[in-house]
Image (spheres, rainbow, N blue to C red):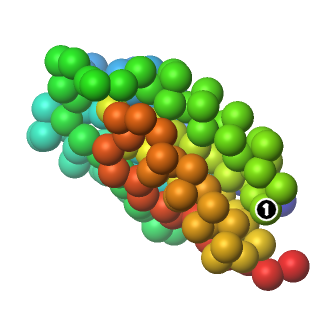
Amino acid sequence: MASITKDKFIQSKIQSKILFTKELSSMDLEVEVFFGEVYIIGLVAKEELMQKVVDIAKNTDGVTKINTYLRVKQEKYPCSSIEVLAQLKKELLNDKATHVTNIRVAVAGCDVVFTGVVDSIEQEKHAIWFAKHIENVGDVYSYLKVVKK
C-alpha cells in the first residue's frame, strides 16, 4: 500500500476509534499521519483522557511513532479558533515563501500547531512568525519536517 494511502487508512482508524470512545470529542481532536507517524492535536475534557487518546493510537496497526499536543479544554478562550485558523491560512496563502498546501494548521484553544512538510527552515520560520502575530494566539508549536527537494 502506498504511503499516502496507508497514512489515510491509519488516520481513519484512529478518528473512528476516537468518535466511538465515550468522553472523547472528535470535534476537539485532529489526527494527522505522515509516513506512519501520528500527530494528535486538540483538547480533552480532563487530563486523564490524554493517555486514553495515546492508547488509541498505540493500539492501531501501522503506527510507528505518536506525537501529541493535547490540552485540557477550558470553559472560555480569549480567541476564536475559527478566526485564528482563517486569518493564519489567509496569511500563509498570500506569502510567497511558504507552500501552504504542504502545511497543516490546527488550533487547540488559542494555541497554533503546525504539521506537514516544508522545503526549508525559512518556510517554517515564516509560518511560525505569522502565527505569533495573530491577536490572542497563545503558544505556537511546529511539527513541520524540512524535506529538501
Image vertical order of residue 116 relative to residue 46, above or below: below
Judged from the image, the secondary structure of the residue bearing numbered disc 1 is loop
Q: Position of residue 142 (x, y in %)?
A: 49, 61
Closer-to-camera residue (56/138): 138
Q: Which of the image's four quarters has the C terminus? A: bottom right
Which kind of residue does numbered mark 1 sit on?
A: Ala
Q: Nearer the viewer, residue 1 or 144?
A: 144
* The N terminus, quarter of image: bottom right
| Place of residue 68 in the rendered image (x, y in percent of width and height, measured from the top left) | 37, 54
Q: Residue at x 54, y 57 (%)?
A: 129
Residue 138 appears at what percent x and percent y? 32, 44
| Residue 83 position (above or below residue 97) | above
Residue at (61%, 27%) from the top-left corner? 86
Q: Is 148 situated above or below 18?
A: below
The image quarter containing residue 56 is top left
**Left or right, residue 64 beside residue 137:** right
Looking at the image, residue 42 sits to the left or right of residue 98; the answer is: left
Q: Which residue is mark 1?
A: 97
> Who's the residue at 57% across and 50% down the image?
130
Q: Residue at x 79, y 81 (%)?
A: 148
Whether residue 34 is visible, yes or no, is no
**Front position in the image: 94 or 61:** 94
129 w.r.t. 105: above or below: below
Residue 27: in sight, yes or no? yes
Residue at the far bottom in the pictured view:
148
